[in-house]
Image: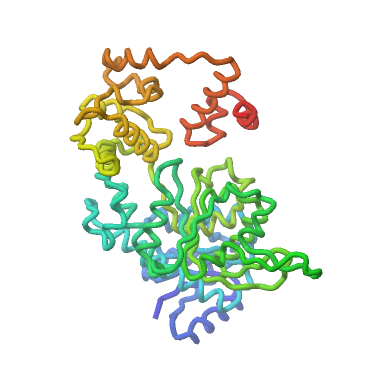
Amino acid sequence: MKKTLIVDDDVAVTNYLKVFLMQTGLFESTVVNDSREVTGFLEREAFDIILLDMDMPNVTGMDILREMRGKGDKTPVVVLTGVSDVDLAVKSMKLGVFDYLIKPVDDEKLLEVLDGALEHSVLHKTISALPSELTTKDLAYASLFEYFPTQDQGMIRLFHQAESVAASDLSIFIWGENGTGKEALARATHQASPRRDKPFVVLEADSQDQDSFPAFFFGQARDWRGTRKETPGLIEEANGGTLFLNNIDALTQPMQVRLKRVIQTGEYYRENSTRIRKVDVRMIVSSTKDLTAPDYADSFNRDLLYHLMVNSIRIPPLRERKVDIPLLADFFLREEAEKSGKEIEGFSEEFLRLLENYRFPDNVQELHTIVAGAVANARHETISAGSLPAYIRRKIEPAAEGALPPAVEGAARMDEFEPCTVEEMVQRHVQRTLEYFGGDRAKAAEALDIPPDEIERHLS
């Protein structure tokens, strides 16, 4: 049986929870009604899970959480409170709370959440127990991650995290800049999961008109006149499998609320219908943005974010793991050379040196494109620095051992000037700045010293 600590100043609530959990035969509960006593209980005894109220006299639930995490106590916590406060929920999330439930809670729902919290705790312990030095050979499904050649320990640990979470049905939030491989990681996670033989459905949230998106996603009910037929939504195509929703931050607030319900209960309804339907789907969502940042407090549903952040995976940009650039470049070289039937030995040292000093705003995707172009134009067995695109030669960081080599510098001067109007020049500059910041309009606007809403005007 799982040892549970129930903390709430309401005696009636704690008595009910203790009896209910005991009757399941799964939990052995300890009750604390005076929150000042919690520290002592935690020092004397280890618990598998904690049910915690937020609004208590003397010591609040948030005080207890901060003290626990400050001491390194990672016992899974489920908040059960009468305080419906989204900001408080998000703060709790950042302290590692598994779920934030508002009283009263359905008994079945409570058991479902407790089961999920315990499952997540096992996954977390598995990941935490990994040795400091890892290799991809330690992965159970190493072949699924072959598209991510890496020597970076952070990336290898990320693969282990994805593989561990894959075994569950918990939702996953993958975030990182454009071109870092979010969809590829989602596919690998799906293939490592028990759902591998079921559909993997990809949807770009920003590719659809947001007014028609709900009908496209959830389906459309037939109207009473019969002039509009019943149509299933994309979510039904993923039934039994995994739905990868890219750029989730593009969804409207109403869609975010409906998506949260799917994640929590598997329930949804088609447009113009009140009939509740059920779907068995594992959600993996992604964004190029850090949605926990204050910039998105008003545009992204905090409650949905709270549920997504339970399993959050950040893919670092390529500039943070430059050790992987030669490895990835060689991987793409072999791939592209095989496609083209060319025999190419590799890159010159100068080619790789310049690549390692480029910031790669479009990350791994951009590196693949650069190598593919170099292979397509290759006339020798070794690809030289002169094969680099002109825009890269212009952007190489000055710190790369001073000026560019004469041959490359000369090529850059030849390709650098291109006649254009002032408007076109401004447009290009705005576009390149936006690319530099991975599509983040707020950061690009700050660097350009213009309001964010002017970005689109300059690009049109």
Residue 334 appears anywhere in the view: yes
Q: Nearer the viewer, residue 186 or 441?
A: 186
Residue at 21% over, 35% down: 344
**Front-lying residue, 157 or 24:** 157
- The answer to whether residue 324 shows anywhere in this view is no
Which is nearer the eye, 194 or 401?
194
Q: Position of residue 346 (x, y in %)?
A: 20, 34
Residue 405 appears in which quarter of the rendering? top left
Quadrant that contains the C terminus: top right
Q: Quadrant of residue 381?
A: top left
Q: Quadrant of the N terminus?
A: bottom left
In the picture, measured across the screen, residue 16 lies left or right of residue 199, that is right
The location of residue 360, given as percent across then percent down, is: 38, 33
Q: Position of residue 113 (x, y in %)?
A: 51, 71
Q: Would you say 378 lies left or right of 8 here?
A: left
Residue at image location 40% in from the left, 57% down from the top: 187
Residue 121 located left or right of residue 401: right
- The residue located at (20%, 27%) in the rendering is 349
Q: Quadrant of residue 2?
A: bottom left
Q: Above or below — where is 337 with respect to 234?
A: above
Q: Nearer the viewer, residue 162 or 428?
A: 428
In x, y percent, where is residue 312? 44, 54
